[in-house]
Image: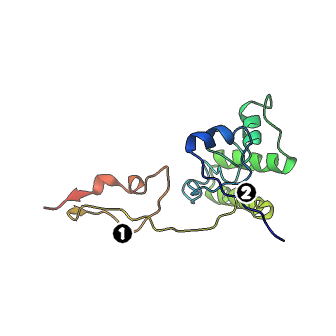
Amino acid sequence: MDVDVRLELISGELRSERAPANMIEVSGWHGDFVTDIEFPSNPRDFVPHRDTGGMNLWPLWGMWYHADGESGEGPPELVQDMHGIWQELMVEPDDERRVELGKGILAIQAEQLWSIGTVGKTPYPLIVNKDLRNFFDEGYWVWGLWWSSGSDPEQLFFDR
């Protein structure tokens, strides 16, 4: 089987117009919000719930959720079930149950393969002043945490 691929580099502004209008067939994204830390609160690459310009995945389904079914396109029952699992995950107090729910979402994603991850654990070098102490050598780079902000920054100090 051959796949005919024609790449077109477009600006972020144009992408923000085309995505919610369902005018983008396939795109690439750096995959923020997919780590263990952020997955429960915003699994946007796995659960259709957003309709903003930055999202190429399921813009009409996300619009449908945001508009309470008044606009967009209602997703298939499987997708609605997955959205329900995520809604339950968001309020579940038990850690083990949350992990079980998250694995359920990922199992559906793996079976349907709406989003394809190609690279994992990409290095993200940071430049740190040589006199800064208690800054860790390794960590997670996640959009919402900016890597170091979730690491007790009150423990950092300068040793001169």
* Left or right of residue 90: residue 132: left
Q: How is the image coloured?
A: rainbow
Residue 68 x %, y %: 76, 31
Position of the N terminus, as image quadrant, is bottom right
The amino acid type, in three-letter code, at marker 2 is Ile
- Could you classify mark 2 by the number of other residues whose Cα lies within 10 Å: few (under 14), some (14-19), or many (20 or more)? many
- Could you classify mark 1 by the number of other residues whose Cα lies within 10 Å: few (under 14), some (14-19), or many (20 or more)? few
Q: Which residue is mark 1?
A: 137
* Left or right of residue 127: residue 83: right
Residue 50 visible within the image: no
Residue 20 x %, y %: 69, 39
Quadrant assignment, res 64: top right
The amino acid type, in three-letter code, at marker 1 is Asp
Q: Which residue is mark 2?
A: 105
Give the CA separation, mark 1 to mark 2.
32 Å
Q: Nearer the viewer, residue 21 or 63?
A: 21
Between discs 1 and 2, the one toward the N terminus: 2
Residue lying at 60% horizontally and 52% vertically, measured from the top left:
9
Position of the C terminus, as image quadrant, is bottom left
